[in-house]
């Protein structure tokens, strides 16, 4: 999925929303638990209900690995279901992997080839040879952690280097020199719109995956205001819990659809 | 597995060796490929041949995830086989995970509870709330990336902060304030013995998992010289390719056993 295709899909749906499929058996409606594969049953219903209001899905691998083999199977089925039924939607494996060269190449194979995801999130701490092996696949994206939305972002990412830059800025500068701009995105948290605006001015043409809207406290309208770029948009705004657990009753799917639509509306500024 | 048990096992085997099970179907002896589960068949033979010469095994999750469901199954079987047959050997899930709080808790559950590994490697870029959820399990260890053995370690870990510390030093100082010392280890690469010695003087009582011996160029004797601590040892020295691919013929297991024994001999300085 190349940049033009992503932009065209954004314009068609009038949405920058990415729905995070952080599916947790303790949180899904109990009537689904008798299903043969409750995780997939939940995801399928959520996907069908939200597809008209979003442009991407982001299953976080942690939630699937927590259930071992069965979880891994649900992950595979979820990716296949999206690819078959909603081929314009981007599938992002939120895996935050990072390892030395030959090992990173294995992760790239696992998520971008075997599972056929469109993108994978990558942690940069181990440097160039841990990030670069994810690049070089036509239409696939490497999404590298820049400044994240959690409180712990202060602990390392915001430390000041002797050259005056924050660690996260230096990381993003380096990463941008390793990976071509048409296959690179950065994770930039929504809980800090002023910082998002600064990072946008430093990278005017790079797509950002923005977590932290909703349950984590960020506002979609503020993110659009701070980070949207005329012509390319440059934003995928993620919401997970606020959408997929909008209701725990029989109406969970419809409620998720409404929550996704509401978030889409909050992004209207991008299309004004 | 607590620290006393690890130290007792080290004294019993006279070894600090950890064998990295980075099993790759393109590299294992071809006669194993007709096996129903070639990855597990290879691992089982390697484990049986090396157990007398090592104290830990470290399967890297990337190599298993690359084969999807089948690989995940082989990973589970490998961990179970070690736990059942060599219960004194530590099993380290080399997963290098790192994500926000509730998600990190899921990874902790996946690897330390569901799979029952003794330890997991963790990437620190997202800070305290991404690291701390792995701690607090009796007898389980959190192994956090400090200074890694790959060339990319220069890119971020070695940058100088405005307070004069390297990023990796600051990371380790912070992590040591978050996790109790009896459940914390650091990854410190073997390819830099002088730096290993410096880090040892900063953390005199912390266990280090040291990758980079063998295929990556580090020497086990130098690692012992630079990092071993009287009484607690404080080192698990990992070798992967140099041991498990010592031969690609029918004698692959014996050759791995000999390679492990040779590395153990190179660590004799720790027991002098």
Image (spheres, coloured by chain):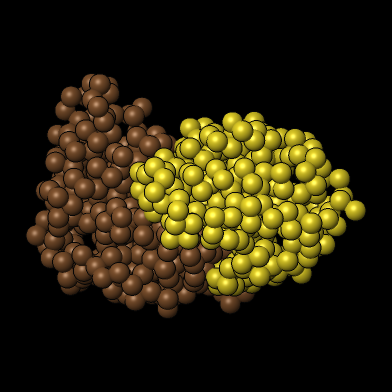
Chain colours: A brown, B yellow
Name the spot of residue A172 as percent of width and height, x first.
Answer: 44, 70
Q: In this view, does A241 lie above or below B192?
A: above
Looking at the image, which residue is at 39% across and 49% down?
A: B34
For this rendering, which residue is in front, A95 or B53? B53
Give residue B146's quadrant in the image: bottom right
At 62% across and 42% down in the image, what residue appears? B48
Would you place residue B11 above or below residue A252 in this image?
below
Q: Where is residue B211 in the image (x, y as percent from the top left)?
A: 64, 59
What residue is at 33 percent from the left and 72 percent from the top? A136
Q: Decide: is A234 above or below A58.
A: below
Horizontal side of residue B197 vs A245, given as left or right:
right
Which residue is more in the foreground, A243 or B248? B248
Regarding residue A219, the answer to whether it shows in the image is no
Query: Between residues A51 and A97, which one lies in front from this camera angle?
Result: A97
Q: Where is residue A179 in the image (x, y as percent from the top left)?
A: 38, 74
Looking at the picture, tell me which residue is in the foreground, A27 or B165: A27
Image quadrant where one finds the N terminus of chain B: top right
């Amino acid at each position: 999925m190349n940049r033009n295709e992503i932009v065209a899909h954004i314009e068609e749906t009038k949405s920058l929303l990415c729905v995070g499929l952080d599916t947790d058996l303790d949180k899904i409606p109990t009537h689904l638990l008798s299903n043969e594969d409750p995780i997939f049953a939940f995801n399928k219903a959520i996907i069908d209900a939200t597809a008209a209001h979003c442009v991407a899905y982001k299953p976080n691998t942690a939630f699937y690995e927590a259930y071992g083999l069965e979880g891994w199977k649900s992950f595979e089925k979820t990716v296949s279901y999206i690819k078959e039924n909603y081929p314009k939607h981007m599938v992002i494996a939120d895996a935050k992997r990072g390892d030395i060269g030959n090992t990173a190449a294995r992760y790239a194979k696992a998520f971008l080839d075997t599972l056929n995801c469109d993108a994978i999130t990558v942690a940069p701490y181990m440097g160039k040879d841990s990030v670069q092996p994810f690049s070089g696949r036509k239409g696939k994206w490497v999404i590298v952690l820049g400044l994240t939305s959690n409180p712990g972002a202060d602990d390392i990412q915001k430390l000041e280097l002797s050259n005056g830059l924050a660690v996260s800025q230096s990381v993003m500068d380096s990463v941008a020199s390793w990976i071509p701009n048409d296959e690179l995105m950065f994770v930039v948290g929504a809980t800090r719109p002023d910082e998002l605006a600064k990072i946008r001015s430093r990278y005017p043409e790079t797509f950002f995956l923005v977590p932290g809207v909703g349950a984590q406290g960020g506002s979609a309208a503020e993110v659009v205001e701070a980070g949207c770029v005329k012509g390319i948009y440059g934003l995928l705004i993620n919401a997970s819990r606020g959408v997929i657990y909008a209701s725990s009753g029989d109406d969970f799917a419809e409620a998720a659809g409404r929550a996704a639509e509401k978030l889409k509306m909050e992004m209207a500024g991008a299309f004004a």
